[in-house]
Each structure stands twice: as structure tokens, then as C-alpha cells.
Image: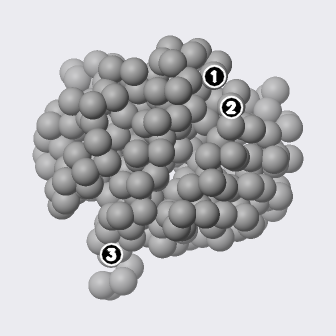
Amino acid sequence: MLIDSHCHLDFPDFVEERDAIVARALDAGVSRMVTICTHVRRFSQIAAIAEAYEHVYCSVGTHPHNAGEELDVTTQDLVSLAQHPKVVAIGEAGLDYYYDRAPREAQAQGLRRHIAAARETGLPLVIHARDADDDMIAILEDETGKGAFPFVLHCFSSGLGLAQAGLALGGYVSFSGILTFKRSEELREIARQIPLDRLLVETDAPFLAPQPYRGKRNEPSYVVETAYTLAETVGVSREQIATVTTDNFFRLFSKMPNPAAHG
């Protein structure tokens, strides 16, 4: 059993064949998918997708690209929407200095509001960090000083320093198809330094399809390829990486019912 901890099933790429995509994931052994919110104003669309599929859950949050458009979204708004039975995470929120599509102050303000919501609800914050390692470390350390909160550094492609800081603060690290790319040896070296009990896998679909699908539209079933590469990278069996990442997922995303706990 594997879990795609981060995908975007609401994106236009999937509209025509969402049923088939979810079915392919289940056939591949991907038993749960979390479709991640990028605009709080579109949350109803995300929730509708999660409601339509037994094995799909969702988050609520504002992507850093959209932080400037949703400055009026409060922590309390996030907390309120997170009461939906299928919401299992807050975010994605964070800092993206690579594209800089929103003012950095807006990104930071949004991130801190999402952290407060994660702290209040106990739901994990899905963190997007790109080319902003130092500022991300500073905010995470500052906010943890106000009270711990659960989080995952999603689609990890940052430096070792951010990984180590996140781990020190109790966070998890999730790897996407980037891990499978030939040029990603440095990232694989970081993966080898992450404790097994803090690893997750994801697709970030429709983006970043892993080898051998690189260049194509990504989808949740392809998380299997990332998991296989992660297993090879850290030196464990494919079965063990599936067990470990699934156990880690349910520990972090604790609101999602764990079938193993009731089996």
C-alpha cells in the first residue's frame, strides 16, 4: 500500500478523466490520495472532489503564489473550513522566491496564518519552500517557539540545512518525482540522511512526473516509481518503503481514518 500525500486533482489536466485516474491509482496500490488546495476561494471545488471519491481526501489553504490575492483569509477561516470531515491538512502554504509571484511579505504573512491554523487544529501544515531556505528556517523556528505544530516539507528540493532544521522541529520530508531525475544525485544524498520514520512520498501531480514518465502529465499512480527510487536510494526493500511511508503518513495525517488500525 502506498499513499500519494500531495496531488492536485482539481487542476484542469484531470477534468476529463478524473474517475479513470483515481481508478488507476487504486489499481497500482495507491490506496489514498490527498488533493491539495491552492486557493481557499476554490475550496468548495476541492471538497467536492474529496466527497466524490472514498479514497481521496483534501487540504485547505493558499499557495504562496496566490498569497497576495488571499490576504483577507484569516486563521479562523482556515480553522473553520478544516472542520470538513475530509480535510486532513492545512495548506499548501509557504515561500516561493524562485517565481516570486506574490510579494514576499504576503507569502510570510500567509504562512504564519496557516501555521497558526495547523497549531489550533492539530492538522499537518503542507509547506511549499523554493529558493527560500533561510527565511523558511527562521519562520519555522520562530513559530515553533510559540508552540509546536505538525508539518511536512512537501516536494522537497531544498538544501540539507532546511531538511535538518525541519527534522529538528519535528517535521517530515516528502519526496516527489524529482528524486528519480538523473540530475538529482544531491537530492538523493539528502534523502539518505532523513530518518526512515520521517519520510513521505508524493506526486505533486500533474507536475513532475517521475522517470520513466518524465515529460508527461503526472498522476497519483506514478507515486509508485518515486517510492521505488526512494527504497533504492535509502537501501531498503520496496515493501519496506511502502510500509514505512504509509505508517508515517497516518501518524502525521492523523485525522484520516487508518484502515490498518481497524483491521
Residue type, mark 2 in image: Ala
Residue 13 relative to residue 210: left or right? left
Residue at x 35%, y 64% (from the top left corner): 120
Asked whether residue 204 appears in the rendered view, the answer is: no
According to the image, label 3 marks what residue?
A: 259
CA separation, marks 3 and 2? Answer: 37 Å
Residue at x 66%, y 63% (from the top left corner): 169
Earlier along the polypeptide chain: callout 2 or callout 1?
1
Residue at x 42%, y 31% (from the top left corner): 63
Residue in the foreground of this view, choosing between 23 and 128: 128
The percent position of residue 131, horizontal first and vertical second, equals 70, 27
Eye-nearest disc, 3 or 2 = 2
The percent position of residue 143, horizontal first and vertical second, equals 56, 55
- Name the quadrant of the C terminus: bottom left
Residue type, mark 1 in image: Tyr
The percent position of residue 160, horizontal first and vertical second, equals 82, 46
Residue in the foreground of this view, choosing between 233 and 43: 43
Tell me whether the residue at label 3 lies in contact with that at label 1, contact meaning CB atoms closer than 8 angstroms.
Answer: no
Earlier along the polypeptide chain: callout 3 or callout 2?
2
Tell me whether the residue at label 2 lies in contact with that at label 1, contact meaning CB atoms closer than 8 angstroms.
Answer: yes
According to the image, label 1 marks what residue?
A: 97
Residue at x 34%, y 29% (from the top left corner): 71
Identify the image quadrant of residue 43. Answer: top left
Residue type, mark 3 in image: Pro
